[in-house]
Image: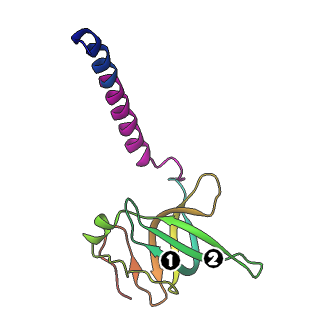
Amino acid sequence: MTRHQSAPTLGALLVAVLVMIAIARAGVSAHHSFAPFDMQAEKTISGTVKQFDWTNPHTWIWVNVPDGHGGVETWGIEGMSPNFLGRRGWTKSSLKAGDKVTMVIRPLRDGSKGGMFVRATLADGKVLLPTGDPTEP
């Protein structure tokens, strides 16, 4: 390959890299959007913790909520990152499968069974907050 043939190849490679960087940045900023949640509303749900996912980039709390007709609906509640919560006193066992819980969430705008974590109260009265400093009953 001659010097004249490699210049367009380098140019194309540079453009491809710049496009990938732009896409990655757009994805990162979209990831941190609160758009799916109704930030003006709060909803309270009560049920039993099905699973607590201590995973990056966000924790997830899966709660089985009675549907009022003898069945249950599983709600997915998005929380802060394990790193954020860990620095505020949370651990991967702060919530366990089987825990009875009442949660306040920012509901999903589309009405799906889920939302963004605001606070939780366990059966013993302990309150879990995303900012840490859980209160004891």
Residue 48 spot, x, y in % from top left:
56, 82
In this figure, which residue is indicated by the disc labeled 2?
Answer: 65
The answer to whether residue 105 is left or right of residue 31 is right
57 vs 124, nearest the viewer: 57
The answer to whether residue 40 is left or right of residue 9 is right
Q: Secondary structure at mark 1?
A: strand
Residue 82 spot, x, y in % from top left:
33, 67
Alpha-carbon neighbours of circle 2 within 10 Å: few (<14), some, or many (≥20)? many
Up/down of 15 relative to 137, above or below: above
Distance of label 2 from label 1 (alpha carbons): 13 Å
Q: Secondary structure at mark 2?
A: strand
Q: Which residues are magenta?
A: 14-38
What secondary structure do most residues of the magenta stretch adopt?
helix
Alpha-carbon neighbours of circle 1 within 10 Å: few (<14), some, or many (≥20)? some
- Amino acid type at circle 2 is Val
In this figure, which residue is indicated by the disc labeled 1?
Answer: 51
Q: Nearer the viewer, mark 2 or mark 1?
A: 1
Up/down of 58 relative to 92, above or below: above
Tell me which residue sits at (33%, 34%) in the image.
21
